[in-house]
Image (tube, helix red, strand yellow):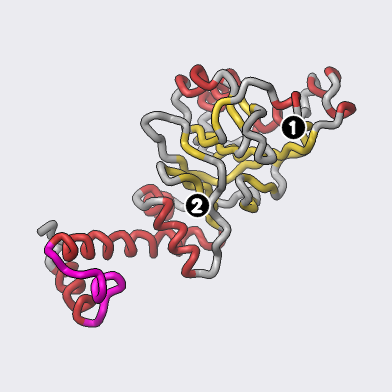
Amino acid sequence: MDAETYKNLSAISVATVTMQLLKRGIRNISMVGVRPLNDPVQRILGPAYTLRYVPLREDLSTPDVLGKPDYPPRLAIEQAPGGSVLVIDGRGRGDLAVVGDLLVERLKVRGVAGVVSDGGVRDCVEALAVGLPLYAAGPAAPASVAGHAAADIETAIQCGGVAIFPGDIIIGDADGVAVIPQALTAEVAQDGVEQERYERFAKLKIQEGRPIPGVYPPNEATKAEYAEWLKAGEPES
């Protein structure tokens, strides 16, 4: 993701992103059961680095396995690049934690942009105090090993019912989290900025007493008026 695309995405909402993807025929990109936990909400934006859990199988969760240096969650915490979003497939189990405050602290120190999961967060108050953007199902006391077995990293996963491939762009705000296919990121960002520019104009017209028909979406007369508004420097009144 280049600097211009990052700037554009930072300026637009998740709602705008979902509308831009809908216009391109892509609907299933908004995660279910994943919400912002920070108060106030912290936006999140970056390429996905993925970690996948599968249902518990005891031979995959022995002390020897959990202690190995190549245990997938341990690799994910140490290898997720700075600026990336660690996206964890928690199988929709909000009652099982996939991270806690120590792991969140390490991710912040390493410059990771945040964590997104449809699983839970343990020691949630302490994890939130770290200040890293966290989007998850909510607090959960049991550790992942109570019901998950770690499978792999940097592979296609699901999170909140949405398919995520490594490098897809994750964006989150108060409305939730959406996934932008990597190949569409630049055009979604650019068109999203224009969408929100027109919506600012449309809101001004509605505040003046205009009815919705003809303004949203615009008819030809409103399009001409919008063009004049742009030429005038986008005045607020």
Residue 90 part of the magenta segment: no
Residue found 51% across the figure and 36% down from its top: 135
How packed is label 1: few (under 14 Cα within 10 Å), some, or many (20 or more)?
many
Describe the element under mark 2 as helix, strand or loop: loop
Residue 56 point in image, percent of width and height = 81, 32
Please, is residue 109 above or below residue 82 in the view? above
Alpha-carbon span between mark 2 and mark 1: 26 Å
> Where is mark 1, residue-wise?
72
Q: Which mark is residue 179?
A: none
Specify the amino acid type for callout 2: Met
Residue 107 point in image, percent of width and height = 56, 27
Please, is residue 134 above or below residue 65 in the view? below
Q: Is residue 199 left or right of residue 173?
A: left
Residue 206 point in image, percent of width and height = 19, 63
Upstream in the sequence, badge 2 or badge 1?
2
The quadrant the C terminus occupies is: bottom left
Q: Which residues are magenta?
A: 208-220
Residue 43 point in image, percent of width and height = 42, 40
Query: Is 36 or 167 nearer to us in this picture?
Result: 36
Query: Is 28 or 69 nearer to us in this picture?
Result: 28
Specify the amino acid type for callout 1: Pro
Looking at this rendering, what residue extends furthest in the bottom direction?
220
How packed is label 2: few (under 14 Cα within 10 Å), some, or many (20 or more)?
some
Residue found 50% across the figure and 39% down from its top: 35
Residue 218 part of the magenta segment: yes
Query: Is 187 or 226 nearer to us in this picture?
Result: 226
Q: Quadrant of residue 227?
A: bottom left
Residue found 62% across the figure and 52% down from its top: 162
Please, is residue 58 above or below residue 42 in the view? above
Q: Which mark is residue 1?
A: 2
Describe the element under mark 1 as helix, strand or loop: helix
Please, is residue 181 above or below residue 52 in the view? below
